[in-house]
Amino acid sequence: MKNRGEINVTKYSGEKAPFDVEKLRQSLQRSGAKEKVIDAVVEQVLPILYEGISTKEIYKKAFALLRKKERPAAARYNLKKALLQLGPTGFPFELYVAELLKAKGYETRTGQIVQGNCVQHEVDVIAQKAEKHFMVECKFHSDQGRRCDVKIPLYIQSRFKDVEAAWLQKQGHGNKFHQGWVATNTRFTTDAIEYGKCMDLYLLSWDYPHNQSLKHWIDETGAHPITCLTTLSGKDKQALLDQGIVLCRQLCDKPGFLDQLALSESRKRKVMEEAEGVCNILQS
């Protein structure tokens, strides 16, 4: 076997890159895991590495180890996969984006029919804060490899300009800052990002913009999706999403939401212990 510093890993896209143990450590640190737990996980991951190992396989091993040692941290580590489960219709992702923006201090409305200058538009999320007024379109993908290409921001920008033209005619809107947004749970192509920059269309994805991406906002606000919980089955998660429950915080505030699920009392306690650990880890 090569020295670990020379091992190349295979990314989800198929690209190869040198394995970086510090990146593994940083992802575990973002989960809120204790240092001794991080050390133990890294120590057990290193021996399984081989040339060309996929980042997915490394993640699965690290997640399984973390789940045994510290469930709330495992839930946070599960964040990228959890965002992929905010489907299948994509409507839960719209609700989630609205809740995330609320956690950032915005007033939000979802599923709005807005009259543009030319035609009506159904807008996923309207967000406002002080003199800022945003039209947010959400693009959900259940496949991590799917990216939003330039056609999506092109289409959204044309819709936004029609809506903005109508907004500017309203009393009190003349001095407001208006902007169109596109939010996705995966990534944008390079062309999409360049178009967004050129047209002042705000793009928000898993890892963009740098230090202001979805993953950074979630770490900052503690607005973790209900789908990150490891103690709930996929069926149970979907039942909660169908009721508009998209945040762990909502479950922490109202544990009674679990009463609609066919769970034993001991199972409910385990779910709440994990949810409360996720909700409290930001303050720990």
Image: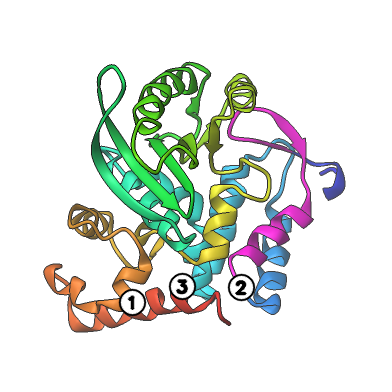
Q: Which residues are magenta?
A: 9-32
Mark sitting on residue 252 = 1
Q: Are marks 3 and 2 in contact (CB under 8 Å)?
A: no
Residue at numbered disc 2: 33
Residue 85's place in the image compared with 164, above or below, is below
- Looking at the image, is mark 3 or mark 1 earlier in the sequence? 1
Residue type at numbered disc 1: Cys
Q: Quadrant of residue 187?
A: top right
| Of residues 59 and 228, the one drawn nearer to the viewer in this rendering | 228
Residue 75's place in the image compared with 111, above or below, is below
Q: Nearer the viewer, mark 3 or mark 2?
A: 3
Residue located farthest toward the front when viewing the structure as drawn: 171
The quarter in which the C terminus is drawn is: bottom right
Q: Nearer the viewer, mark 3 or mark 1?
A: 1
**Does 193 sit left or right of 22 as displayed?**
left
Residue 262 percent coordinates (x, y): 13, 69
Q: Is residue 40 magenta?
A: no
Dot 3, crowdedness within 10 Å: few (<14), some or many (≥20)?
A: many
Residue at numbered disc 3: 278
Residue at position x 47%, y 55% from top? 130
Q: Using the rendered image of the protein, determine whether residue 60 is visible from the camera's viewpoint.
A: yes
Q: CA distance from mark 3 to mark 1?
A: 9 Å
Residue type at numbered disc 3: Val
- Looking at the image, is mark 3 or mark 2 earlier in the sequence? 2
**Does 14 sit left or right of 277 as displayed?**
right
Q: CA distance from mark 3 to mark 2?
A: 11 Å
Residue at position x 38%, y 74% from top? 275
- Callout 1: helix, strand or loop? helix
- Callout 2: helix, strand or loop? loop
